[in-house]
Amino acid sequence: MRIEKITTPPSFDGSEGLIATIVRGDVPPDGVNFVTESGDALQVGMMRHKKGWSSVPHQHLLSPREIQGGGEVLVIMYGSVDVEFYDSAGNWVAKSTLESGDVLIQHSGGHSFLAKTSFNAIEVKQGPYRPEEKVYLHASIDSM
């Protein structure tokens, strides 16, 4: 399992740092392997188990949480898409290409996408979704 971190230097108020994590579509090691930190707003792990594995029936209890930010996860089912990353001020940080099986975890900042091929993805966001909280950056996807 290859993991790539997209980062910026932390700002004076500590508001930046980790922008995104990309988990490449390689085969993960056996077991449950979390690629996010335990304190992150989104908890993302990769699971790989052999035939016959089972878990004990369980549920996750509801508990109040205060979430800062609006991260998201994108799982590329098939195809290829370029993604550009921006810090919270809208400054360009990095570019990467996501392929079938890759997972993008956006922790902070922003992003833009350009489909290199037709692609299919699953997107997961912290709910409830509030369209009025989406901010468009002035950067241009034409630079891709």
Image (cartoon, rainbow, N blue to C red):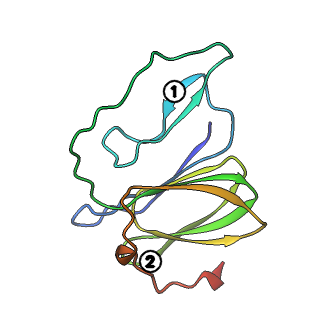
State the SS at label 2: loop
Please state if 72 lies on the left or on the right of 121 as rendered: left
Q: Is residue 77 above or below residue 135?
A: above
Q: State which tag comes first along the sequence, 1 or 2.
A: 1
Tell me the residue at 68%/33% (across/down). Answer: 27
Could you say where residue 64 lies in the image, as x and y percent from the top left?
21, 44
Q: Are marks 1 and 2 in contact (CB under 8 Å)?
A: no
State the SS at label 1: strand
Could you say where residue 23 lies in the image, as x and y percent from the top left?
58, 46
Number of marks in the rendered image: 2
- Location of mark 2 (residue): 91
Tell me the residue at 36%/69% (across/down). Answer: 130
Q: Which mark is residue 112?
A: none
Where's the N terminus, which quadrant? Answer: top right
Q: Nearer the viewer, mark 1 or mark 2?
A: 1
In the foreground, 86 or 63: 63
Please state if 109 lies on the left or on the right of 48 as rendered: left
Under mark 1, the amino acid is Val
- Location of mark 1 (residue): 32
Could you say where residue 14 lies in the image, as x and y percent from the top left?
25, 61
Tell me the residue at 66%/17% (across/down). Answer: 50
**Disc 1 to disc 2, C-alpha distance:** 35 Å
Where's the C terminus, which quadrant? Answer: bottom right
Under mark 2, the amino acid is Asn
In the foreground, 59 or 122: 59
Q: Is residue 105 above or below residue 119?
A: above
Please state if 82 lies on the left or on the right of 124 as rendered: right
Could you say where residue 71 lies in the image, as x and y percent from the top left?
41, 58
Mark 2 nearby-residue class (10 Å; few <14, some 14–19, many ≥20): some
Q: Residue furthest top?
A: 52
Mark 1 nearby-residue class (10 Å; few <14, some 14–19, many ≥20): few
